[in-house]
Amino acid sequence: MGNNLFSHGNVAGSSFSQLYIQLRKKEQRIYTDEQVSRLPVIEDNHSHYNEWKYRRQSSERLVDYLANKTRALNVLEVGCGNGWLSAKIAEVPDATVIGIDVNIEELNQAKRVFEKENLQFSVAEISDLSNNEFDIIIFAASIQYFASFKKVIDIAMAMLSEDGEIHIIDTPLYKSSEITEAAKRSRLYYSGMGFREMSNYYFQHSIEELQGYNYKMLFDPHTLSNRFLRKRGLFYWVCIRKQ
C-alpha cells in the first residue's frame, strides 16, 4: 500500500515495500494462501484475532452498503495488500473491482488466491490510473501511508464518476491536537520493532483535513448510540462524495 505521494520517489517507494513486507513478517501479518482465502475470518488463537474481528465488521458494513446501491459499480481499492477486501467487494452483484498496490509480494498472493472474472490486481500507484473513472474508490487501512491527505484525495476525487464516492475505513484519524503524540507513538513502535525507518513512511492525518470536502461519517465508534447498541469498531468510516 502507499505510493510515491510519500514524496520520496520510486526508489524510496521500493525501499518502503521492502521494509513494509519485512515488518509485516515480524508482526505475523503475512498469511498463508489458505488463511488469506478465508479473511477476514481467522482462527481464534491467532495473535491478530481481535483486529480481524473488527475488520470483519467494518468490511461487512461496507459490502452491505455497496450492495444496496443496486446498480453496476466500478470499484478501485487503493493499497489492497493481499486482496481479501477487493475479493469480498467483487461478490457484490454487478461490481467490477480493481485492487492496486506497490507491494509485489502480497499482490502476487492476491492474484494467486482470488481468481474472479470481475476482479483484477495490478502493481500501480493511484496516479497511474488517473485516466480511469470509478464509482467507488476505497482506502482501507492505507491512507496513513500517504504523506499528503489532500493530494491523494484530490487525485481520487478527479477520478470519480458524477455521483462517485471515496470510502476511508480501518484507518486512524486524529484530532489536530493529538497528532504529535500519535506520531511519537508510531516512532517508538517502529523503533521497538527494529524498523525505525518505517516512521518515515507512516503519516498521521487529522479529522480536520476533511473540511472542505462533501463528507459524511457513516460510522463513528465514539458516539453514545454506537456504544449503547454495541456496534463495535475501532475507526471512523468516512464517505466523501463528489457532489
Image: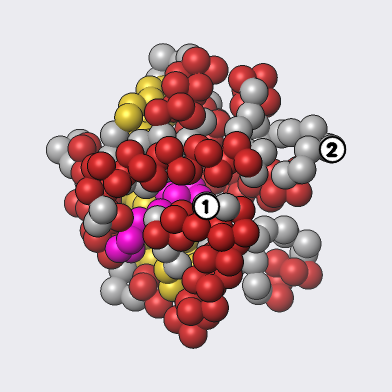
Q: Is residue 7 visible?
A: yes
Q: Amino acid at mark 1?
A: Phe
| Dot 1 or dot 2, earlier in sequence | 2
Tag 1 residue: 195
Q: Nearer the viewer, residue 213 or 3?
A: 3
Please identify the quadrant where the C terminus is shown: bottom left
Please identify the quadrant where the N terminus is shown: top left
**Residue 51 % position (x, y):** 69, 49
Give yes or no for residue 183 being in the magenta stretch. Answer: no
Quadrant in the picture for residue 129: top left
**Residue 25 % position (x, y):** 60, 37
Quadrant in the picture for residue 120: top left
Position above or below: 37 against 61: above
Q: Nearer the viewer, residue 178 or 9?
A: 9
**1 sits to left or right of 189:** left
Rendered image coloring scheme: secondary structure
Q: Is residue 75 visible?
A: no
Q: Secondary structure at mark 1?
A: loop
Q: Amino acid at mark 2?
A: Asn
**219 sits to left or right of 8:** right
**Residue 5 % position (x, y):** 27, 53
Which residue is located at x 15 percent, y 38 percent?
131
Q: Secondary structure at mark 2?
A: loop
Give yes or no for residue 142 being in the magenta stretch. Answer: yes
Tag 2 residue: 45
Range of magenta residues? 139-149
